[in-house]
Amino acid sequence: QKEVEQNSGPLSVPEGAIASLNCTYSDRGSQSFFWYRQYSGKSPELIMFIYSNGDKEDGRFTAQLNKASQYVSLLIRDSQPSDSATYLCAVNPPLLGGGADGLTFGKGTHLIIQP
Amino acid sequence: NAGVTQTPKFQVLKTGQSMTLQCAQDMNHNSMYWYRQDPGMGLRLIYYSASEGTTDKGEVPNGYNVSRLNKREFSLRLESAAPSQTSVYFCASSEFGRVSDEKLFFGSGTQLSVL
């Protein structure tokens, strides 16, 4: 069974600090990993993806992947109030028989950046 | 460029009524998906279509049917709505739907209430 686990929060971080969001997954053969941001009442939007072990940086965001530990994280530097949202971790497990079978999402972590 | 367009945005049904949620994408994507999002449950895959002419069940397909009308359009039908189908429904698409490239782009969602 494919599972993606996240702490639901809320995670409260002061403005300007680093927010650290964590995610674990159960399927060791998973190939790719995604972070989506979802504002209240809106649809999820992709902010980061990572395929290889290590760090990937994009502006204030850094995704970290450790396949041996089945762990992926998202760091947000210089946190802003506009970063307050729910962050969804998503995992693309191995395909069975080819084709697309959708991402498996965690339940999300609610992040609050305090001014 | 509209991306992924869903209609309607809001809908209220009575138990036993039927309806179809419409989704269209203008990004020439091959794969399309329907997810539902419930509080505390995260996003769950209902059905997906890896390519035009194919559809497959996801995690929670019971009570739903889908049609991939053409490459652009993917509809979700509730034949006999039940209160348990009260949820926010998201349509999504991805360019290839392959293991390493399944970045999903979401529509704005349909908030459905079944009384």
Image (cartoon, rainbow, N blue to C red):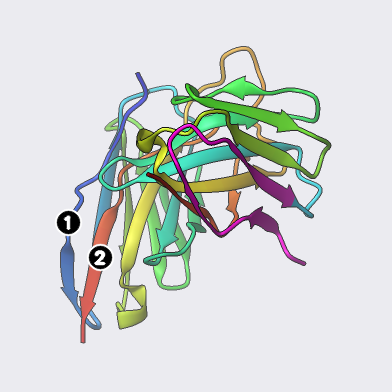
**Residue A80 visible in the picture:** no
Residue B26, position in %: x, y? Answer: 79, 55
Name the residue carrying label 2.
Answer: A111
Residue B92, position in %: x, y? Answer: 60, 46
Report the disc number at residue B7: none
Q: Are marks 1 and 2 on the same chain?
A: yes
Residue B21, position in %: x, y? Answer: 62, 44
Q: Quadrant of residue A62?
A: bottom left
Residue pictured at 44% horizontal, 22% vertical: A29
Q: What is the chain letter for disc 1?
A: A
| Drawn side of residue A2 relative to residue B2, left or right | left
The relative height of residue B3 versus residue A26 in the rendered view (above or below) is below
The relative height of residue A85 versus residue B92 in the rendered view (above or below) is below
The three-letter amino acid code for the residue at tag 1 is: Gly
Q: Secondary structure at mark 1?
A: loop
Report the disc number at residue A9: 1
Nearest the viewer among B47 and B64 is B64
Q: Quadrant of residue A81?
A: bottom left
